[in-house]
C-alpha cells in the first residue's frame, strides 16, 4: 500500500509541479518548479522506503516462523518414529 501511494505521489509530482517550456526551435521540455516539488518528492520516496522496510520485516518474520515450524515438525517426527539401529 505504501509503495503504491509513493509511486502515485511521484507521478503526481511530475505532473503538478512541472511546467512545459517551448524554446525558440519549438522543442518542448519540462522544467520542475522548486519549493513544494522537493517536499513532495522527498515525502513520496519516504513512502516507498517505508514500503520496502515493511516487506523486509515481513520476510524476516516469515523466515523465523518457518524455521520454528520446521523444527517442531522435525521433533514430532523424531518422537513418532522408533529409534532404529
Image (cartoon, grey):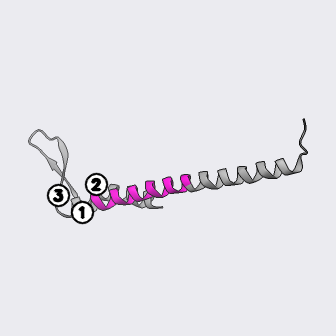
Mark in the foreground, 1 or 2: 1
Nearest the eye: 24 or 64: 64
**Earlier-in-chain disc, 3 versus 2:** 2
Which residue is rendered at x = 90% and y = 35% of the image? 85
Nearest the eye: 18 or 21: 18
Q: Which residue is mark 2?
A: 14
What secondary structure is found at the residue carrying circle 3? Answer: loop
Which residue is rendered at x = 28% and y = 59% of the image? 42
Query: Viewed as shown, does residue 35 lie left or right of 50?
Result: left
Nearest the eye: 15 or 8: 8
**Neighbour class for label 1 at 10 Å: few (<14), some, many (≥20)?**
few
Query: Viewed as shown, does residue 52 lie left or right of 35?
Result: right
Q: Which residues are magenta?
A: 41-60
Mark in the foreground, 1 or 3: 1
Distance from disc 3 to disc 2, alpha carbons, whole Å, reads 10 Å
What secondary structure is found at the residue carrying circle 1? Answer: helix
Most extreme residue toward the front is 85
Q: Position of residue 22 (x, y in %)?
A: 14, 46
**Earlier-in-chain disc, 1 versus 3:** 3
What secondary structure is found at the residue carrying circle 2? Answer: helix
Q: Which residue is mark 3?
A: 33
Asked if residue 46 is among those painted magenta in the image, a careful observer would answer yes
Asked if residue 54 is among those painted magenta in the image, a careful observer would answer yes
Distance from disc 1 to disc 3, alpha carbons, whole Å, reads 11 Å
Q: Which residue is mark 1?
A: 39
Q: Position of residue 40 (x, y in %)?
A: 27, 62
Whether tag 3 and tag 2 are in contact, CB under 8 A, the answer is no
Is 36 situated above or below 81? below
Amino acid at each position: 500500500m505504501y509503495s503504491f501511494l509513493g509511486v502515485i505521489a511521484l507521478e503526481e509530482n511530475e505532473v503538478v509541479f512541472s511546467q512545459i517550456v517551448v524554446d525558440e526551435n519549438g522543442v518542448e521540455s519540462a522544467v520542475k518548479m522548486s519549493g513544494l516539488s522537493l517536499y513532495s518528492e522527498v515525502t513520496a520516496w519516504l513512502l516507498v522506503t517505508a514500503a520496502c522496510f515493511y516487506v523486509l520485516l515481513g520476510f524476516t518474520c516469515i523466515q523465523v516462523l518457518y524455521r520454528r515450524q520446521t523444527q517442531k515438525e522435525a521433533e514430532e517426527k523424531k518422537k513418532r518414529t522408533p529409534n532404529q539401529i
